[in-house]
Image: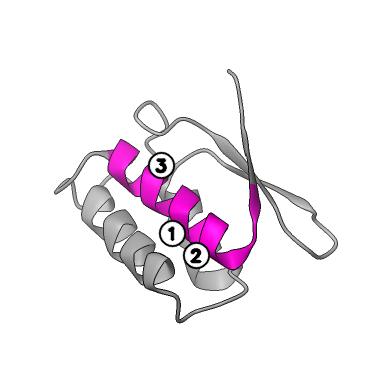
Amino acid sequence: MKWCTSGEFAPLMLVVSGPEKYKLVATLGQAAEMLTIGWPIDDGEEYLIAIRACRDAIHGEIPAQVARTALIRAADEAGISVITVVH
């Protein structure tokens, strides 16, 4: 499983409401955690695709980049701004 692999997952900053306005997502595990715990909606089509993509990437069935792209689409669907992090 690839929970903490960051080499294949280019970091993102999500701009969300709440006390921690900026959430850094730098690994598949952080993406999965954000989607399952910190997401404002849980029924959008892109959200469900992102959940499945994270699961599949963690299990090594698809590239981490595919899960990252799905996360960005889910963020757009939920009205969450995404900032690309340069490292």
Which residue type carries mark 1? Ala
Q: Which residue is mark 2?
A: 35
Which residue type carries mark 3? Cys
- Residue 25 lies in the magenta-colored region: no
Q: Is residue 25 above or below residue 80?
A: above
Q: Is residue 62 left or right of residue 78?
A: left
Q: Callout 1 environment at 10 Å: few (<14), some (14 to 19), or many (20+)?
A: many
Q: Where in the figure is residue 12, as x and y percent of width and height?
A: 57, 38
Q: Nearer the viewer, residue 8 or 1?
A: 8
Range of residues picked out in magenta: 64-81
Residue 4, label in figure:
3
Q: Quadrant of the C terminus?
A: top right
Q: Which residue is mark 1?
A: 32
Q: Residue at x 81, y 65 (%)?
A: 18
The residue sitting at the bottom extreme is 43
Q: Callout 2 environment at 10 Å: few (<14), some (14 to 19), or many (20+)?
A: many
- Dividing the picture into quadrants, the one containing residue 85 is top right
Q: CA distance from mark 3 to mark 1?
A: 11 Å
- Residue 72 lies in the magenta-colored region: yes
Q: Where in the figure is residue 63, as x and y percent of width and height?
A: 23, 39
At numbered mark 3, what does the secondary structure look like: helix, strand or loop? loop
Q: Is residue 26 left or right of residue 40?
A: left
Q: Nearer the viewer, mark 3 or mark 1?
A: 1
Q: Nearer the viewer, residue 79 or 84?
A: 79
Q: Is residue 10 above or below residue 28?
A: above
At numbered mark 1, what does the secondary structure look like: helix, strand or loop? helix
At numbered mark 2, what does the secondary structure look like: helix, strand or loop? helix
